[in-house]
Image: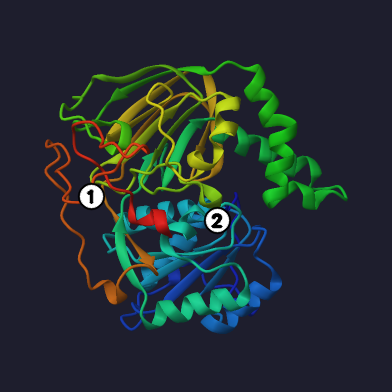
């Protein structure tokens, strides 16, 4: 992710003027700005050079830390960039969207549309929007597509602890991220530094730290309270309960190894952890799981595809705002980066949606987003082929949620 003390380069060695001296220019709204995390594994000198040539230098921001993130956001909003692309993973995206969102609110300016370049480790958003890859040719192709005909669509974001992100959560995923950061720091100054980064780093940290912790420590006790508009439980095969859960009511109480909230279906590496995240624009997908290590291994393929069903071990809800309580305090992640250990968090759907460049969408955003249904009503019935329970039998009574369009990407 972008980390504390942000430096900014034009790609030619010069630095941009302080944000306060930038005068908005009416001819700039169509321009594209790219902010890349110079610490990301795939942000090489070749990648930076490629982006510099494509963008002609002045619209490229190479960051090494977070200290100047507010200044960069002020520059981006003041100049009126029409599109801001982030490169460096889901954490980089979350940081820059949070900063630009806040600055646009402060200036009373419209939000730019955002885009994602596949330069990080997990790259969950790449699976959502169809970003090509981290090679120079792939990046050039993505930017050419964006300039020529890339469409866009609105997405919601999770808001938690002052940060906007596509997903967040307590539990085993945050433990893995915490351990990954620890292994990366431990090996960074040794000849084994490469083993601490990327997929290799996750493998090493999972085998040496996360898995032993998972086997030794019992699941935390979780309590979830609805703090927003009425929410709905999602049952087997996507059947939505007709009865809603009102504000102040307890959604769930019991042991949990993972408590996640998301507005997109994926975690990193294409793990489809939230299959119902895109079903309602006015709700997030809350998933609570308490799987044993043996169950996870035995059903790994179907879990990875988002198809595994076990109502006794996995609970799904469509929520607008929730209060999460964990005992004892548990690691928490935001946007694929370890955030901190905590005993409680309030997570809500951000008030404003953002427009995201989506290479799967129709060119130029020709298909408008459908308005969300009234917040007090349950999800409307779907006029689509019902899902089955895997044995050919129809699902239980209730509204069925078909597989999200992201599933086939």
Q: Which mark is residue 385?
A: 1
Looking at the image, the residue that sits furthest to the front is 392
How far is mark 1 from mark 2, CA to CA? 36 Å
Relative to 351, is 322 above or below? above
* Disc assigned to residue 89: 2
Q: Residue at x 59, y 57 (%)?
A: 120
Q: Position of residue 131 (x, y in %)?
A: 48, 66
Q: Which picture quadrant has residue 287?
A: top left
Q: Residue at x 38, y 72 (%)?
A: 81
Residue nearer the viewer, 194 or 236: 236
The colour scheme used to paint the residues is rainbow
Residue 355 vertical placement versus 283 (above, below): below
Q: Secondary structure at mark 1?
A: loop
Which numbered dot is residue 276?
none
Q: Name the image quarter holding the C terminus.
A: bottom left
Disc 2 secondary structure class: loop
Residue 18 vs residue 199, the one in the foreground: 199
* Crowdedness near tag 1: few (<14), some (14–19) or many (≥20) residues, C-alpha within 10 Å: few
Q: Earlier in the sequence, mark 1 or mark 2?
A: 2
User: Horizontal and vertical percent for residue 13?
Assistant: 66, 77
């Amino acid at each position: 992710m972008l980390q504390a003390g942000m430096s900014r380069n034009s790609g030619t060695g010069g630095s941009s003027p302080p944000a306060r001296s930038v005068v908005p220019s009416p001819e700039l709204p169509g321009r594209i700005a790219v902010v890349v995390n110079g610490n990301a594994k795939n942000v090489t000198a070749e990648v930076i050079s490629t982006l510099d040539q494509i963008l002609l230098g002045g619209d490229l921001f190479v960051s090494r830390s977070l200290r100047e993130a507010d200044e960069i956001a002020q520059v981006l909003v003041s100049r009126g960039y029409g599109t801001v692309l982030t490169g460096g993973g889901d954490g980089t995206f979350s940081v820059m969207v949070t900063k630009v969102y806040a600055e646009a609110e402060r200036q009373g300016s419209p939000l730019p549309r955002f885009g994602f370049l596949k330069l990080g480790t997990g790259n969950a958003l790449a699976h959502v929007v169809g970003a090509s890859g981290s090679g120079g040719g792939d990046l050039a192709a993505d930017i050419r597509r964006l300039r020529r005909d890339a469409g866009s669509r609105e997405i919601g974001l999770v808001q938690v602890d002052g940060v906007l992100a596509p997903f967040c959560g307590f539990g085993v995923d945050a433990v893995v991220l915490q351990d990954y950061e620890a292994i990366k720091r431990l090996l960074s100054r040794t000849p084994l530094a490469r083993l601490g980064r990327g997929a290799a780093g996750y493998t090493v940290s999972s085998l040496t730290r996360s898995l032993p912790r998972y086997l030794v420590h019992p699941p935390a006790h979780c309590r979830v309270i609805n703090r927003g508009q009425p929410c709905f439980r999602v049952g087997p095969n996507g059947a939505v309960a007709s009865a809603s859960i009102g504000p102040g009511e307890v959604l769930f109480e019991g042991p949990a190894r993972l408590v996640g909230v998301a507005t997109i279906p994926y975690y990193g590496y294409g793990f489809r952890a939230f299959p119902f995240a895109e079903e309602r624009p006015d709700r997030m997908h809350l998933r609570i799981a308490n799987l044993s290590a043996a169950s996870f291994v035995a059903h790994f393929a179907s879990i990875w595809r988002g198809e595994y069903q076990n109502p006794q071990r996995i609970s799904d809800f469509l929520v607008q705002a929730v209060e999460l309580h964990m005992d004892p305090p548990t690691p928490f992640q935001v946007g694929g980066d370890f955030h901190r250990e905590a005993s409680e968090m309030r997570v809500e759907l951000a008030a404003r949606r953002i427009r995201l460049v989506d290479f799967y969408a129709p060119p130029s955003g020709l298909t408008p987003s459908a308005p969300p249904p009234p917040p007090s009503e349950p999800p409307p019935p779907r006029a689509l082929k019902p899902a089955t329970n895997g044995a050919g039998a129809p699902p239980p009574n209730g509204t069925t949620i078909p597989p999200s369009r992201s599933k086939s990407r």
